[in-house]
Amino acid sequence: MNRYRRCAAAWGLVVRRAEATRLGRLPKGFSVTTPSGTLWGRSVLLCTGTRFKRWSNLDGGEIPVFASAFSQARSFEGRKVAVVGGGESAMHQSLRLAGHAKTVYLIHRGRALRGIELLRRRLAQRPNVRVFPESELFPGTRGTVRVRGRAQDRSLAVSAVFALIGQEPELSLLREGRAPSGVFIAGDARPGTRRQIAAATGDAMRAAMECEEFLSGR
Ligand SMILES: Cc1cc2nc3c(=O)[nH]c(=O)nc-3n(C[C@H](O)[C@H](O)[C@H](O)COP(=O)(O)OP(=O)(O)OC[C@H]3O[C@@H](n4cnc5c(N)ncnc54)[C@H](O)[C@@H]3O)c2cc1C
């Protein structure tokens, strides 16, 4: 990446590390506000990725809720945990947790898990993963959670909950909800993309070329 960055700098790229807090419109372009000053440009390319969808069922309770298991899995060695979500992230991270936790309860609202067959098979092979379809998780009493669904209503004692209910484009800079002419969106931030590194890289190329056409008035 450093070599790539040096190459791009030779073509005029200037990198500033800051959070963009506001995107404003100017008569001939846009302003981008950051804590270290305001920048302006005739065009803006947003590559802001995604944010995890918020899950609030256990807000304010004692049981910790995490949005990712990748860095936490080892901390739950031999303990019981719950995963909420029925997509590929939930399946993938349940498998990761199953390598450490005593029991993983996978709770999802749908009838079937939405993920590739290989993940489904691997989950079915794990004796310490219990799947609760058509169910939701709610606060229970005294450090427990309650699984409610068509087929069950029961309490579970868990040390943590991993809420993996999906991601959504991080487009909070677009206050009108859509990109005005001159603002381009690329990568995971663009609704409907495949959310893979190769797809995001290719999409950035497409957006950069559209941006260049816009700037040169073609
Ligand atoms: C857990 C997980 C596992 C994945 N595994 C794979 C995999 O195995 N293979 C694969 O191909 N893809 C994988 N992906 C998807 C891959 O990470 C994305 O497709 C890719 O990173 C998208 O690149 P991007 O540049 O569009 O967005 P991102 O990589 O998300 O980058 C967005 C950047 O914008 C920054 N940003 C957001 N808002 C602002 C702001 N207001 N101001 C300043 N900066 C801001 C963020 O901090 C972030 O650095 C995975 C994703 C996740 C979450």
Image (tube, rainbow, N blue to C red):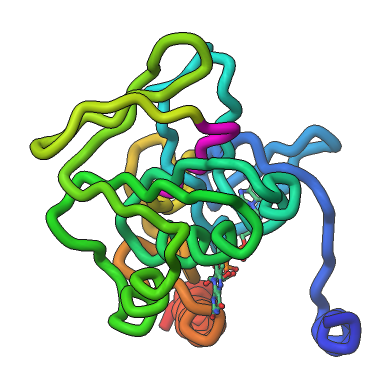
Q: Residue at x 83, y 56 (%)?
A: 16
The answer to whether 105 appears left or right of 4 in the picture is left
Q: Quadrant of residue 193?
A: bottom left
Q: The C terminus lies in which quarter of the figure?
A: bottom left
Q: Nearer the viewer, residue 152 or 217?
A: 152
Q: Is residue 137 visible in this depiction of the protein?
A: yes
Q: Residue at x 49, y 70 (%)?
A: 187
Residue 205 lies in the magenta-colored region: no
Q: Nearer the viewer, residue 48 or 15?
A: 48
186 to 155, vertically: above or below = below
Residue 6 picture location, percent across and down: 90, 84
Q: Which residues are magenta?
A: 158-164
The answer to whether 178 appears left or right of 164 in the picture is left
Q: Quadrant of residue 38?
A: top right
Q: Residue at x 61, y 52 (%)?
A: 101
197 to 133, vertically: above or below = below
Residue 123 picture location, percent across and down: 39, 70
Which residue in the rendered view is the most extreme toward the left?
150
Q: The N terminus lies in which quarter of the figure?
A: bottom right
Query: Which quarter is ligand 1 in?
Result: bottom right
49 to 157, vertically: above or below = below
21 to 201, vertically: above or below = above
